[in-house]
Image: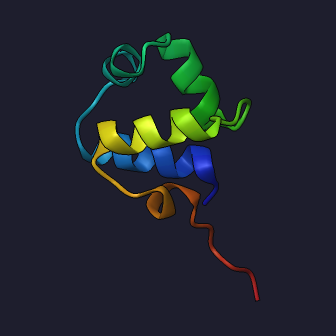
Amino acid sequence: MNVGENIRTIRTAQGLTLEQVGNSLGVSKQFILQLEKGLRTPNLSQLLEICDILCCTPNDILKTERKN
């Protein structure tokens, strides 16, 4: 999974909407959707805020599956 997929997985597991996360971050739900689709990448401060909102660590969001 990539960063956006990880954000979506964690967000939906917690029952949060795009709008709720966007409001907490101070951005639009469209911005969160763009992150989840991989069209945008959060900067470091946004990443840390997203982690606070989703109660996860940066590693939870940044981890990717290795292909062997």
Colour convention of the picture: rainbow
Q: Is residue 33 left or right of residue 38?
A: left
- Tell which of 36 and 62 is nearer to you: 62
Q: Position of residue 63 (x, y in %)?
A: 57, 66
| Vertical side of 68 occupied by 9: above or below | above
List the single residue furthest toward the front.
45
Q: Position of residue 45 (x, y in %)?
A: 54, 35
Out of 45 and 59, give the one closest to the viewer.
Answer: 45
- Residue at image x 27%, y 31%? 16
Residue placed furthest toward the bottom: 68
Query: From the viewer's perspective, is 54 left or right of 4?
Result: left
**Position above or below: 9 against 36:** below
Quadrant position of the C terminus in the picture? bottom right
Q: How many marks?
A: 0
Q: Position of residue 66 (x, y in %)?
A: 69, 79
Q: Residue at x 42, y 49 (%)?
A: 9
At 37% from the left and 49% from the top, the residue drawn is: 10
Q: Quadrant of residue 37?
A: top right
Q: Residue at x 48, y 56 (%)?
A: 58
Residue 25, image x, y percentages? 41, 21
Q: Quadrant of the N terminus?
A: bottom right
